[in-house]
Image (cartoon, rainbow, N blue to C red):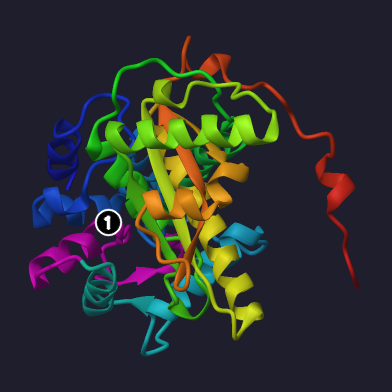
Amino acid sequence: LHKESVECQSHTAPGSLAMPFSFLSSRCRLALAVLALASSPLAYAFAPALYQTASSASSSRLYNELTAEQEHAREVFNNLDTNKSGTLSGEELGDMLRMLDIDASYEDANALLKYLDSDGDNEVEFNDFLPWYTDAAESVKELSSTFQSLLIGRRTVDQFDQTVVSDDVLERAVACAIAAPNRAMSEPWRFLKVGPETVQKFAELNDSVGMETGKEALLDWTQIPGWCVVTTKVNSDDPATELEDFKSTSCAVQNFMLSMWSEGIGTKWTSGPVQKTQAFADLCNVDTTEERVAGCIWYGFATGGLVNADPRRRKKKVEDVLSRLP
């Protein structure tokens, strides 16, 4: 198993958080499952702490007073213990691996059993299971902290370099977007990548509307390197459903922007008056009886890097917005 984990680590650059799980061999995937309880997507990561075997001293400890995390470990253990024997067999560990979508053989399951079985009785007791689970959970927490920092750190970008962002980055952002929470699986969103010819028409429309309203355009839209128009379903017969769909589309936009930010790409979600016009919808080939423009996401490499993105922070703190009811 140690050999397999080293092989897995060799497939990715040092410091890399993750790689597609399907890229790995079955035994590599098994090794990762052994070294991290993959109930979390973050367990795909190659955190070095996961490759440390719990010491024999910690393996032999009995846990009478458990923390919340350790109590959860007991719940996981009890769920795996289908015959309620108080121990896990090779077969039950094999079932766990299959639940994790790992094509594990009988020999693989037994290898996991031997890895966790500290006293050689061919069964995994809770005090065998707990140190391994705890180490894995702590490593996942470290990765969770990184993820939370990404969420908190995202900022709106107003100035972009002219280098065009790869379509691969866009497609990954859309893949994240459509994984957003969605009421009744209505999938109300659509994403339209806009090329230079259409952007030029957008800019001309923007200038025209500005002349009509007496407001000169503040920004040359043709200098925005990436455009993605987002639409959401309309439902004139059921405004409540339309609102729920718009909520889902808003979640999708957030996922899109977070994915871009994670790859070093800045974004700005804009929904000004020009984008609400029928002329804009027509340029996007949007049938306004079926959907409406929810806004545009501008994206590109931030001028000066993401560190120079809009530094504004929220005025309210957690204690200002979090209430508790009995």
Residue 142 spot, x, y in % from top left: 50, 38
Would residue 115 be counted in the magenta stretch? yes
Residue 158 spot, x, y in % from top left: 55, 23
> Who's the residue at 56% across and 43% down the image?
274
Task: Evaluate whether residue 218 shows in this view.
Answer: yes
Which amino acid type is marked by label 1?
Ala
**Where, quadrant-wise, is the C terminus in this rendering?**
bottom right
Range shown magenta: 102-130
Residue 299 spot, x, y in % from top left: 42, 32
Residue 43 spot, x, y in % from top left: 36, 50
Q: Find residue 126 and report its image quarter.
A: bottom left
Number of numbered callouts drawn: 1
Q: Is residue 24 left or right of residue 226?
A: left
- Helix, strand or loop for disc 1: helix
Would residue 36 be counted in the magenta stretch? no
Q: Find residue 111 and report its image quarter.
A: bottom left
Which residue is farthest front? 212
Which residue is at the front of the view, 47 or 80? 47
Q: Is residue 112 left or right of residue 3?
A: right
> Who's the residue at 29% across and 24% down the image?
164
- Position above or below: 197 against 29: above
Which residue is farthest top? 304
The residue tagged 1 is 33
